[in-house]
Image (cartoon, rainbow, N blue to C red):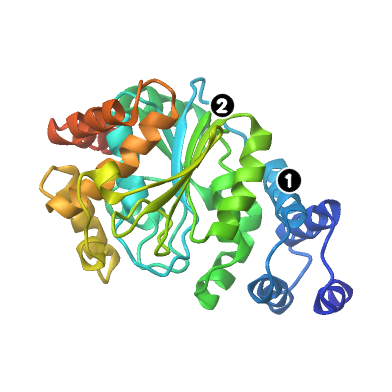
Amino acid sequence: MKKILQYLFEYKTLSREKAKEILVNMSRGQYNESEMSAFITVFLMRSITIEELQGFQDALLELCVKVDLGHPVMDIVGTGGDGKNTFNISTLSCFIVAGAGQKVAKHGNYGATSISGASNVMEQLGYTFKADNAILKEELETANICFLHAPLFHPALKMVGPIRKNLGVRTFFNMLGPMVNPATPAYQLVGVYNLEMARIYNYLLQQSGNAFTIIHSLDGYDEISLTNDTKVITNKGEKIMTPRQLGKRMVMPEDIHGGNTVEEAAKIFTRIIKGEGSWAQNAVVLANAAMALYCTGNFGNYEEAYHSAVDSLENGKAYQSLQTLISLQAK
């Protein structure tokens, strides 16, 4: 690792093959914590290249526990690391999408830079993490959604989890999360925290050939926040959409705060999915869910997808999906 670090400190970049090799070695425990921390820190001081990111992605996908769920699934995921501490917008949107009839395999982890990541809130709600393909498939078929806790599927992520938590800042692992869902989703809504990441994801997702939508709120959120205009990038091109176009209204940053503890985050989550959220909270999750549904190509326009999301939330379908999923944990 000393040679690799010296090489990187000279402002050189890694080839795709070398990046893959390093992450594979990391997962095998060949480097100590200090070496791994130093390696991760390099990419906080300069931009990661597409080749490096592809190499890291190659390693994680090669090493991951494979999943075959037997259905084309959707994932809604943000890179995290936007420092905004919003409530769990992506995870809530997943349940609205599931309630609307689209099967979802949500890939998530504990929060590294936020108080409550997707895994924190799912655990708090009573979900048991698992990597058993048959059980996950049953969840998907019964509740229309299953949850893939990243460390169970990615040994390399398990190794660096404590380091990421201790650093408490955005790392290249935030960038990798949306790219390494072991269920290989047919549709993806990916939120990014800056326009450079949007450009990189656009390149990588174009290579996959799957339907995707990348979103970036122009004031720095990695989701449709409705606090500002949103950049929307798809297989077919890109555009800027306003809060009124996406969610019928604009909201204030304080309206979408995520709470100060995991318990608070879970209470906010439960309130919203029961249909008891504030108009601002509902507007934001509906906009994200609608954009995800529209990404599947099953709706003629965004408005149709939005109405389907509203129906899922307001008629209790999203909440039913959550209740069904949690009830399966007791089996």
x then y, percent, for residue 50: 72, 53
Residue 119's disc is none
| Mark in front: 1 vs 2 | 1
Work out how far the residue at label 1 is from the one at label 2, CA to CA, in angstroms. 19 Å
**Number of other residues with Cα within 10 Å of mark 2, as a class: few under 14, some 14 to 19, many 20 or more:** few
Q: Is residue 287 left or right of residue 271?
A: right
Determine the residue positioned at 31% across, 62% down.
Answer: 86
Are the residues at dot 1 and dot 2 in contact (C-beta closer than 8 Å)? no
Asked if 254 appears above or below 224 in the picture, the reply is below
Q: In which quarter of the image is the C terminus?
A: top left
Which of the pair 231/269 is nearer the observer? 231
Name the kind of residue labelled 2 in the image.
Answer: Asp
Name the kind of residue labelled 1 in the image.
Answer: Asp
**Number of other residues with Cα within 10 Å of mark 1, as a class: few under 14, some 14 to 19, many 20 or more:** many
Which of the pair 64/269 is nearer the observer? 269
Which of the pair 313/224 is nearer the observer? 224
Q: Mark 2 points at which residue?
A: 68
* Count of numbered circles in the view: 2
Q: Name the residue under label 1.
A: 58
